[in-house]
Image (spheres, rainbow, N blue to C red):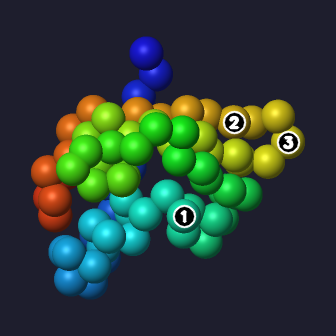
Amino acid sequence: MPTVRVEEVVDVARDALFAVLTDHESYDRFRGVRSCTLIRDGKPERNGLGAVRRVHLGGPAVLDEEIVVFDPPAVYE
């Protein structure tokens, strides 16, 4: 399975950054993302473990992502 790893250093509170990166409803704020819809709720949070999100990147480019690791505010994969 293809894997994407993105690493960036930013000067912001860890909790605040984690909240932004895991909130599917706000993905359209990122360049290149048209929309993101939740296909399956995660547990214990909507965007948590097991969540499946459909990300529309424009044109025919659509990807489904499943959250397989969720350990706030440190890690989600």
Which residue matches tag 1? 25
- Residue 19 location, x and y as percent? 32, 70
Query: Is there any visible trace of residue 30 in the rendered image?
Result: no
SS category of the residue bearing label 2: strand
> Residue 38: percent from the left, percent from the top?
53, 47
- Residue depicted at 36% across the width and 53% down the height: 46
- Secondary structure at badge 1 equals helix
Q: Which residue is mark 2?
A: 62
- The residue type indicated by label 3 comes to Gly
Q: For marks 3 and 2, give the CA distance.
A: 8 Å
Position of the N terminus by quadrant: top left
Q: Nearer the viewer, residue 34 or 8?
A: 34
1 or 3: mark nearer the eye:
1
Total marks shown come to 3
Distance CA(mark 2)–CA(mark 1): 16 Å
Q: Which residue is mark 3?
A: 59
Left or right of 3: which side holds 10?
A: left
Any mark on residue 44, and which? none
Left or right, 24 with reference to 66: right
Q: Nearer the viewer, residue 37 or 15?
A: 37
